[in-house]
Image (tube, rainbow, N blue to C red):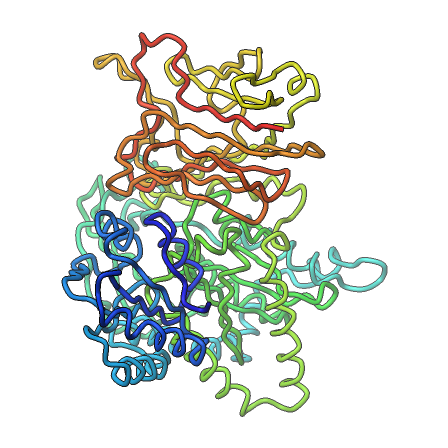
Amino acid sequence: MVVRELPDDFTFSQFIAEAATKLVVIDFYADWCGPCRMISSHVERLSEKYMQAVFIKINVEICRRSFFHFIFLFIVETSIQFGINAMPTFVFLYSGREVDRMMGANVEMLETKIVQQLKEGFVATSDERIFLEKFVEYSQRMQIYEDEISQALARSLIPCDKLMEASMVNGKTSKFELVKLLLNWFKTDFFVWTDVPKCELCGQNTEKSGEVISIEMKEDPTEEERKWGACRVEVYKCRKCDTNVRFPRYNDPVKLLETRSGRCGEWANCFTLCSRSLGLETRWIYDVTDHVWCEIWIEDLDRWVHCDPCENVIDTPLLYEKGWGKNLNYVFAFGLDHIRDVTWRYTFNHLETLNRRNSCRETVLRNFIRKLNMRYASLMSEERKKEMERRCMKELVEFISPTMQIRDGSEVEEQGRTTGSEEWRKQRGEIGNGKSTGRVLVPTEKEISDRVFRLKPIPQRYFSLEYDCAKDQYRRGVDLIKGLESLLSKQQNVCRMVDQTNNVAYICCQEGRASGELCWSFDFGGQHVKNIELRLDSVQKVSDDVMRAIICCGDMCTVVPPTGELELETIGGSKVDVKIYFLSEDAQLFLTNLCSEDCASFRMKAFF
């Protein structure tokens, strides 16, 4: 059976996530509806004919009450609501967004609409065109780094001989070492970070008197500023002399060789010219959530290597997600003769990332990138074309496994952003004060053998873990362990709060954070886990979709229902993760009265 029946409300989100960017055809039906029964076999036939689409049947009598709650998780235009008042109704979705619908049991019309939507899956909407248009400009800008005069100017400022000599390994230049040295020189000796510009009139005055304060306005660039690629100018006011101070955002890398200052855009721009001037094949990387960096091709490694000049970091692609706490969605690499979607190099949980990619349908994005690359390929030599095809295939294979992006022993991967003022980094949510301990709970044989659950029909050995939010204390078997974070494998942007006024304790997002995550990880090794019981007490705001709890066993993840109680009887492996996602600053977990006695907010039992 190709048509998938929705058994309950909680599996809808899973179906949509699995569909990714395919066309989804939802058949709303009722058992008492004659036309629904008539068209049912035709829907089966169409699902077998159009395998590139996903077909789902929803019985409105079962899912009517809470269907709208789940659909809102995946609808970008929140004003859209599904008002199903006639059966059958067919709703067509792309990336969770409704693109069409029809009512009635007209088989020919249904097939026509399916064919039409599959064709239109490659045609960009007006919003998608706006999103994609800027990437054409970004791809064209790579030509400016090939100017020989610009490269010569850059080389005149770089201590080339010193860097080349220091990068020699076994009698030949190591490009990886050369890039490391170039990054370090650029960060420590050449370029300067600018939060706010200094007032030129104050000269050598102290930072306190000469520093400028908050942005007053943004002005159009002058003719001279426009000449050097400035599209906008920030204007500040000096604290001491009340003078307006202009900060043109220059885009010409030659001008940046002169100013040697700016934010991440200026840093990546100027560094790209410097690396090209040394003959290093370089890509300019654009993160849609507002950051830019570079990648450099290292022949000895046969891969592209991540380089962030303003952080002086190399080959640490998970820095932004794990260290800074960024929720990346689109990351693109722009080379001289190609463009690639490299989002999957910089993210670990690909499914979560895919759910955040709602600016453009994946089919439209892939088609756009393919056409751009076809233009480039038409100008390539056959040798270059074959090499780029080889690299592309190798890169795609690398993206398949998120673990290939992990760099063992890299402490940098866990650090927050270092450039920019603390206030500025906090505003951008890149301070990186979340942490991942990697702690995994491995029950001992004694812990298991000492505990037998005799209320079951057949007595079973089990392992238990409880957490009391009021006492901020775990009970692991018979042991008491203090502190929420002590047994977590991941704690990101989340903390325990005590409200003395209302005499309660709870878990919530840290101040200024709109999302966060908790995770407990278990490894039962050779023990055969028969079933797992999970209970989460006092889970607030679940109905408003600001919190989600998931338990993952092997290759299967199950959403914990709003009741907070779940029993799993099918365990897909020995490793289990219990994850709680805070999706809003309003989310509260384990709300508990401080006077409560032995009130376990979190309970997990694994039976053997």
367 left or right of 126 in image: right
283 left or right of 279 in image: left
The one nearer the camera, 196 or 396, is: 396
Is residue 286 positioned above or below 506 on the image? Answer: below
Residue 22: percent from the left, percent from the top?
40, 70
598 left or right of 440 in image: left
The one nearer the camera, 548 or 5, is: 5
Q: Quadrant of residue 426?
A: top left
Residue 566: percent from the left, percent from the top?
43, 34
The one nearer the camera, 262 or 88, is: 88
- Residue drawn at (24%, 56%) of the image: 60
- Residue drawn at (54%, 23%) of the image: 457
Is residue 528 positioned above or below 149 on the image? Answer: above
179 left or right of 510 in image: right
Q: Is residue 138 visible?
A: no
Residue 398: percent from the left, percent from the top?
63, 63
Q: Quadrant of residue 328?
A: bottom left
- Residue drawn at (31%, 47%) of the image: 196
Q: Quadrant of the C terminus?
A: top right
Residue 258: percent from the left, percent from the top?
44, 63
The one nearer the camera, 104 or 138, is: 104
Q: Is residue 419 visible?
A: yes
Give the farthest residue toward the right. Answer: 170
Q: How many marks?
A: 0
Is residue 202 positioned above or below 36 on the image? Answer: above
- Residue drawn at (39%, 57%) of the image: 355
